[in-house]
Image (cartoon, grey):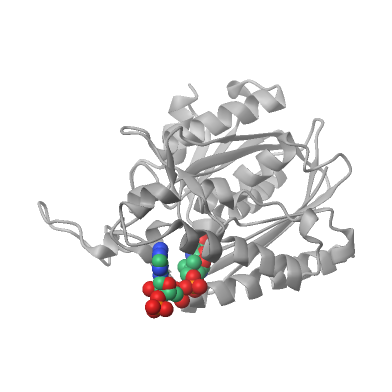
Amino acid sequence: MSNDIVIRGLGRYVPEKILSNADLESIVETTDEWITTRTGIKERHVVAEGEYSSDLATAAARMALKNAGMKAEELTHIIVATFTPDNIVPSCACIVEEKLGLKHRVAFDIAAACSGFLFGLEAARAMLALHPDANVLVIGSEVVTHRTNFTDRSTCVLFGDGAGATILSNKGEGPRLLDVRLSTDGELGNLLTVAGGGSASTYKPGEAVRDDYFIQMQGREIFKHAVRSMTGICNEILEANGLSNADVDVLIPHQANWRIIDAVGRKFEIPAEKVFSNVQRYGNTSAASVPLALSEAHSTKFIQDGDLVMLTAFGGGFTWASALLKF
Ligand code: UT7
């Protein structure tokens, strides 16, 4: 564990277009009342025609660079967590590198679904241990709505598009990344799948996409595992650092569903006013959700100087993770 990693800058971006619960009422058989009481979500942002994950990622990166007072040229590594890259090849990270006007950096994607940003933080820690002068850009960026079946009411009301970014270095001023904990369980992989287009679920030229092209999930089962896994890995990281839940000033869980966020806060015995949530306005933006929430919590001063901030996420795989930050 290193105490020296500095969070130089935070950034975020969401596309302009908003899809409200009322809009969804005219697309599938649902109601604002059902969506609000079951998920807390009121609206989500959706990309415009021709707007892709790399565009959202680049916009979030530019905000993080501005926030850090850094030039893009200073970046050495670009890590993008996404399950909705523009293409399978080239990686989203390589496209972001190009869009930032850079060459000859180390750019790659991470696939850990909604936990991807936290997996990216851990990869950044490894990069910074190997390359002490590195400046690592970690982004979570998703166009989830392009992998959402808008005839399936059990999934299409949940997701939105967006991006969040952070820049990490061994030097400079800023909050500290204290520790990260990750875990996975492939046996639970069937709980959430996006199979179509993968090598186990191929398409022939001209063939129409099947339902497997879109997110398929077992909502109730995921709900249970989400609460259990996030609470467990938060306890683990606190214990490893000689801390307890009473030391946590701000908890930022993956923004999937307000009921999950609330259940984690309660199980963890953290007062509701210390738990950050913006799921109401963005829905579940998968790997973008935690960095988007972190950047927003910071710029709205929900996070104060000196705060101990705990991030936690869960996602398809099954993957789950936690991180501790000191502001
Ligand atoms: O990043 C990870 C991504 N996945 C998740 O985070 C999912 C976690 N799970 C959840 O958030 C919740 O399980 C859901 C919000 C997905 C569902 O809530 P639930 O309370 O577990 O409801 P349910 O799936 O058990 O469905 C209850 C009822 C069903 O009707 P019947 O069988 O009781 O008549 C559904 O058909 O609600 C119905 N339903 C809907 N009704 C109106 C399902 N979706 C809708 C909808 N509008 N959009």
For the question of whether residue 186 can be seen, the reply is no
Residue 201 placement: quadrant:
bottom left
**Marker count (numbered):** 0
Residue 289 drawn at (x, y percent): 57, 49
Q: Is residue 327 above or below residue 256?
A: above
For the question of whether residue 170 can be seen, the reply is yes
Image-based side of 186 in relation to 117, left or right:
left
Q: Is residue 126 above or below residue 53?
A: below
- Image-quarter location of ligand 1: bottom left
Quadrant into which the N terminus falls: bottom right
Residue 228 placement: quadrant:
bottom right
Please name the residue shown 46% across and 34% down the image. 15
Quadrant into which the C terminus falls: top right
Please name the residue shown 84% across and 53% down the image. 249
Seen from the viewer's position, the closer of residues 292 and 77 is 292
Q: Is residue 171 above or below residue 221?
A: above
Seen from the viewer's position, the closer of residues 22 and 85 is 22
Please name the residue shown 89% across and 59% down the image. 247
Seen from the viewer's position, the closer of residues 310 and 180 is 310
Residue 258 drawn at (x, y percent): 61, 60
Residue extending furthest toward the left: 206
Image-based side of 255 in relation to 266, left or right:
left
Residue 82 drawn at (x, y percent): 47, 49
Seen from the viewer's position, the closer of residues 317 and 169 is 317
Please name the residue shown 48% across and 30% down the image. 97
Residue 52 drawn at (x, y percent): 38, 37
